Image (cartoon, rainbow, N blue to C red):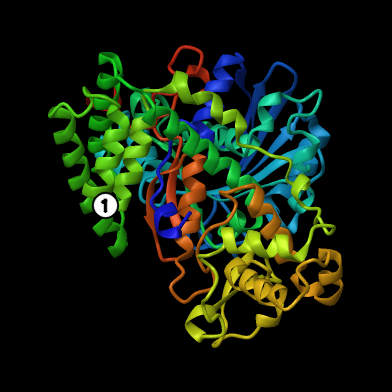
Amino acid sequence: MRLARMGCFHQTRLSFMRALLRDLKRERWKFARESWRVDARGEGVALYSARGPRRTYTLVCFSRDLPAKLRSDRVIANAWDATFALFDGAPDEADIKRLAANVPLQEAGQCRQSELVMSRANRSVRVFSRVVDALARGAQPPRELLDASGYLMRTTAVYANGKFGLCDRENFAGRAGHDQMFAAPFRAEMLAVWLIRWFSIDLAEHLARAAGGRKAVKLARPLARQLGIGNATGLGMAPFLLLHPALLHCWMRARETALSRVRGISRSGKKTRAHFCRALARMRAGLSQWRTEDRRQLGRLRELKNDLEKISAQTRGGALQGEAPWDALIRWSRRALSMEGQELLVSLALEPHGELVDDLAHEMSVDESRYWRIRAGRRVGELRDAIDANYRWALGADYAEPRRCARFWYVSEEKLEPRLGERFDEPGAEKELPLAAARDIAALRASLGAFDADAALAEFLRAHPRHRHAVRRAQLAAQLPYAEIRDNVIAKELRPVDLLRCKLSFFGATRFDPKSDRWVRITMYQHAPFPDELSAMDADDWAYPPLGENGE
């Protein structure tokens, strides 16, 4: 639960994208492009439906011919190449008209409870136009071009859960009449992104036909599968894990339980070993497609390539053929590999064990309200002991020292997004969010030490109401061991990108490309089947790039 390690996580079988596609196939969902009203310039609306056992959901896509000078990944942008809403049901013309007046405005518009997700995306400047030009001439784009980016469009926000009028998650996740798969985390968002990927290919092919006429061709499916959806994610997402400690516990517990199950295997069969070696070979090949200009990440990639060589050497030497082979391999990795390599090995070790671990993907959600209530009848001494047991990492530091309190988290007035301020260089520290668990728990412990140990917490909180949020966190952490990130998240050394990397790995993101320590580009659903292929293809054999020619 240290950020240096969490910032090295990779996708696994439990990641939300992968679990979603498995469930969509198992439940035999049906998908269709219901409407395409887009002109030769790329302006118009398109509708894509996803029909589940109980309800239909529709991605409503608004496309425009955006001038290049208006295209930006920054959250302060106010125009995009495409905007989207995931609609609960099948929208009629009145719904589409209302959405057209609001969704392209994003934050400046207003959604209703009939919309579950709102998003926006821009075309990849490097790739989109070249793919369209090639298809218009009747040619396929070179594979190297697609490898360089990994997507045609990239989202810059995927909003849900009540924001800007969207439906609250509790109104559709796991409720009667809705598809039960939505009870798992971020399912509506991941469904929307998967359908956006389909739209991005359709838009490129449509513009190619408009430019090339009869000469134009469709993008070959093996090449199309090389393309996912990009995403640019910044500080707006970073505090999520700090704000949802019970949910973080569920995610981490599932991941650790999966690893524990695998490490407990006494012998590994031939098929399992072969599956692992194929995934390892595919990851080694895929690493060559991972592009970044970040100096720190480039160093990590060099280490990772060396680590994969070491893992290959271990497996060739028979490391998987002895007693408790996976436990031995993980123990070896702690001595022999970088932290990034250790965490990638965790992902690879889970890969051939779907029957053993996939059920845990349905144990990664929680009713967080169960933990909101402070148990004020407990004794001061009991909480003091719990803090001493669970927060040793946070106690003893001087949080008044400038280096230890250099930053503060706040919400921006303009975009209502979390931001990170410099405490001694910028105004606004009085608006700080209560996210600095290490500092606040240490302050709580100091106040508890001066209070009667047999007194009820209610008495303590009447005297010290500023500690309410810290008391709540301390009580929660005593029940949920993975609830707290064990680092000082206002320290000068904080790298917010580690928070982003951890959360995005649970989404299933790949090809992490940090643009600073505060935002990162990723790829989602690269190599995954498209909706019209899901019933005939393996829903889960896409997280590592294929080895053959043209993506086959």
Residue 174 position, x and y percent, is 74, 29
- Amino acid type indicated by mark 1: Ser
- Relative vertical location of residue 7 with respect to residue 362 in this rendering, above or below: below
Which residue in the protein does label 1 denote? 338
x then y, percent, for residue 537: 43, 15
Residue at image location 78% in from the left, 73% down from the top: 452
Nearest the eye: 353 or 57: 353
263 vs 233, left or right, is left
Q: Quick check: can you spot residue 209?
A: no
Side (left or right) of 80 relative to 212? right
Expressed as whole percent of the image width and height from the top left, the position of residue 458 reads 86, 65
* SS state under label 1: loop
Crowd tier of the residue under label 1, counting other residues whose Cα lies within 10 Å: few below 14, some 14–19, many 20 or above: some
Nearest the eye: 36 or 14: 14
In the image, what residue occupies the spot 50% across and 32% down? Answer: 14
Closer to us: 286 or 153:
286
**Left or right: where does residue 257 sit relative to residue 116?**
left
Above or below for 85 versus 77: above
